[in-house]
Amino acid sequence: MGKLKIVVDRTICEGIGPCAEETKYIELDKRHKAVVLEPGKPKEEVMEKAQHVKRQEVILDLTPEEEEEIFRSAEACPVKAIFIYDPETGEQLYP
């Protein structure tokens, strides 16, 4: 399992939604903005908290298959509102 830092820039996000179709970790909230779900935290709590920030940042511990899902999800975003970083080095991995 590897760790990735997922950042959703909610000011860029237009709520088109293909990102949410690629992984279980991203859903659209009631304002149609992408939200990264955090395992172990209630979904409603995560959704509520995300509504009050311009950039949601979450570090996820993922299997190789889940990592692929996250990258496909970020690539599916037509406005490039999802960024992926290595949380240890800070290196931007996508886009």
Image (cartoon, grey):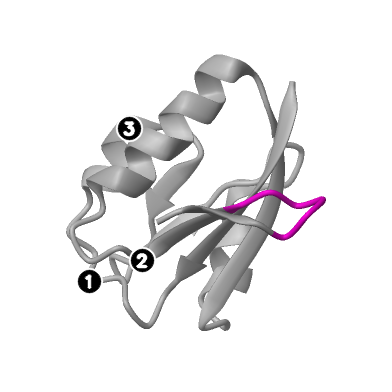
* Residue name at image x 65 percent, y 57 percent: 91
Q: Residue 22: x percent and y percent?
A: 32, 32
The alpha-carbon separation of the residues under discs 1 and 3 comes to 17 Å
Nearer-N-terminus badge (1/3): 1
- Residues at discs 2 and 3 in contact (Cβ within 8 Å): no
Residue 62 in the image: above or below residue 44: above
What amino acid type is highlighted by mark number 1?
Glu
What amino acid type is highlighted by mark number 3?
Glu
- Residues 3 and 36: in front is 3
Over which residues does the magenta segment extend?
Answer: 85-90
The alpha-carbon separation of the residues under discs 2 and 1 comes to 9 Å
* Residue name at image x 22 percent, y 66 percent: 79
Q: Which of marks 2 and 3 is in front?
A: 2
Q: Mark 2 points at which residue?
A: 81
Q: Mark 3 points at which residue?
A: 22
The quadrant in which the N terminus is found is top right
Q: Can residue 54 be seen in this view?
A: yes
Residue 10 in the image: above or below residue 84: below
Q: Residue 26: x percent and y percent?
A: 44, 45
- Residues 32 and 73: in front is 73
